[in-house]
Amino acid sequence: MKKIILFFLFSLILCLGCSQNIKISGHVKFDDGEPVSFGEVCFETAQNTFLGRLDPNGYYTVGNTKDGRGIPPDDYTVYLSGTSLVQTVPGKGNSDVVVMVEKQRVHPKHTHPNSDALKFTVKKDGKKTFDFTVERPPQKK
């Protein structure tokens, strides 16, 4: 009987902790209105990182409350990952040589976890949608 009561209390505490987590979503677009349709949105604290994959229309979801998981209320730095495009191009003079070229598709200030470009506070009873606009990389002259 004592084990059943302890199990019940443990389950109750676990469920209460889960209920604090929140499913959030949003839309990411460039400053010209085009959706960012590649990569992931990362919500990061000193302890955790939560990811949401961007769909072709620039929408993402982070956290899944159906199975008890989600994103806890906290202050987050938000950045994008997986946004560079790696291409292979033939090397000069020798057709057997292939060079990997990385092309940034989003301004670097939006792709680094130590950037102050995007900050959000997720509150238990606050908004659940976080839309934001990012810049394209600077054009080389």
Image: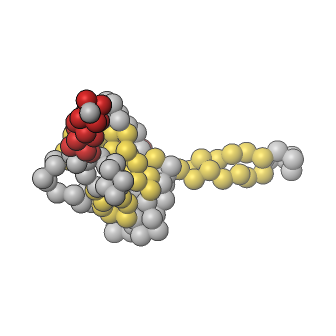
Q: Is residue 141 above or below residue 77?
A: below
Q: Residue furthest front?
A: 1
* x then y, percent, for residue 40: 44, 52
At 40% from the left edge and 65% from the top edge, which residue is drawn? 58
* x then y, percent, for residue 38: 48, 59
Camera-nearest residue between 8 and 41: 8
Q: Is residue 94 above or below residue 6?
A: below
At 69% from the left edge and 45% from the top edge, which residue is drawn? 100
Question: Would you say 14 lies left or right of 106 here?
Answer: left
The answer to whether residue 19 is seen in the rendering is yes
The answer to whether residue 137 is seen in the rendering is no
* x then y, percent, for residue 122: 20, 47
At 22% from the left edge and 41% from the top edge, which residue is drawn? 12
**Figure quadrant of the N terminus:** top left
At 23% from the left edge and 35% from the top edge, which residue is drawn? 5
Question: Would you say 11 lies left or right of 108 here?
Answer: left
Q: Quadrant of residue 54?
A: bottom left
Camera-nearest residue between 7 and 124: 7
* x then y, percent, for residue 112: 40, 39
Question: Would you say 25 lies left or right of 103 here?
Answer: left
Camera-nearest residue between 132 and 21: 21
The number of callouts visible is 0
Q: Is residue 140 above or below residue 57?
A: above
